[in-house]
Amino acid sequence: MNLRKWGLVALGFALGLAGVAPATAQNLDLKRDGRVFHVAACPHGNPALTARCHARIVTDARGNPFNGKTSANPNITPSGYGPSDLRSAYKITSNGSAGYTIAIVDAYGYARAESDLATYRSQFGLPACTTANGCFSKVNQTGGTNYPRDDTGWSQETALDLDMASAMCPNCHILLVEATNNSFANLAAAVNYAAAHANAVSNSYGGGESGSASYESAYNHAGIAITVSSGDSGYGVEFPASSPHVIAVGGTSLSPASNSRGWSETVWSGAGSGCSGVYAKPSWQTDGLCARRTVADVSAVANPSTGVAVYGPVNRRNSGWLVFGGTSVSAPLIAGVYGANGGTATYGSDPYAHLSGLFDVTSGSNGSCGGTYLCTGAVGYDGPTGLGTPNGTSAF
């Protein structure tokens, strides 16, 4: 990506000058970070014991998603960070191997998943990942091929997840597991299937903790790296990020910088964090203000104003280039880092034992918690960004 171009693109979104697609009901969730407007891919207002995805789509000032390079607009360059930017920011040099499978768990179907993923990977020079070459596979929550009905918002979420896992681990195999719908019961079934057939499982969704204990065991798989986005509503805890058996992934704002790293990060104001009201504290967490599980463990870019390029559904019929934020970016990105490292995971404990493999994020806030580390960036551990962001793969 041309990094200097980013500010001009962002300004275009804000002024409503970018190419647009028809507005939808999800625009009721229109928010703004700096000069960038964004909406939730999955609408709010779900009932109890269901999850909503944590993808946020960069839009113009009217809430219309940016419709970039398509067959009708072949000369538009994708905006947002691409794989080379993300790998540079997080010092990832390994491409992983075909012996490592990353599973993506999402709700509903996505008929164009393989073809859209192919466009993203081709654009950025990543190796092909197809059913034909054995790299890509798609199943329903029981491992069958009777796929759920498509849902545009969840398909957008899935496109983001597939692209971020690809960006960080180009040689990893990818398994897409589609839950019948966004109920925790069906998502849990999909996670159980994924964990039996993959080395890492990415989950970019969440909901209330109340009643979630019935499904927590689905996220307890020794040796498997199960990443979960922490949420996009600022200070406050969601399940399954609050499970003590997952790697809860918070969010940052990521910007180029004239320092030795070449990048800088602060807390993203939307990143979820805080103290679980249900789940016990894992033994590797030692922070003092939460008697139970503290969210998050680690983090990565999530601010839509420093968003990532994704090729996915613009609407039910067409796909195109979009820019995404939300902790739905950071969860599959971290799953990809686990893939680039290879090996097994000891639940969420590995980063706690390898602090030198992380960039500490020490400034910014996601809400009001009396100025404590639970919502404020701090030296060492803090809620919104956990222990920090990847500095290579050694912490994973």
Image (cartoon, rainbow, N blue to C red):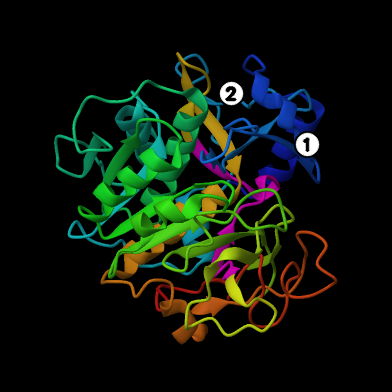
Q: Which residue is mark 2?
A: 67
The part of the image, by quadrant, that contains residue 224 is bottom left
Amino acid type for the residue under numbered disc 2: Asn
Residue 6: give x, y in percent of width and height: 68, 44
What percent of the width, then of the height, locates residue 3? 63, 50
Near mark 2 (Cα within 10 A), the count class, few <14, some 14-19 or many ≥20, is: many
From the top left corner, tell me how far across and down residue 284 is, in percent: 48, 83
Q: Is 287 in the magenta?
A: no
Which residues are drawn in magenta? 294-310
Depth check, front residue: 369 or 28: 369
Quadrant of the image occupied by residue 317:
top left
Q: Residue at x 57, y 39 (%)?
A: 48
Above or below — where is 99 with respect to 326?
below
The mark that comes first in sequence, 1 or 2, is: 1
> Is label 1 in a helix, a strand or a loop?
helix
| Residue ID for mark 1 | 11
**C-alpha separation, residue under disc 1 versus residue under disc 2:** 15 Å
The residue lying at 37 percent from left, 20 percent from top is 149
Q: Image check: 290 left or right of 196?
A: right
Relative image position of residue 53 (x, y in whole percent): 53, 40
> Which amino acid type is shown beneath numbered disc 1?
Leu
Identify whether 108 is placed above or below 364: above
Q: Residue at x 72, y 58 (%)?
A: 235
130 left or right of 230 in image: left
Is 301 contained in the magenta span? yes
Residue 268 visible in rendering = yes
Which dot marks residue 33?
none
Location of residue 54 by image quarter: top right
Q: In this orientation, does residue 333 appear?
A: no
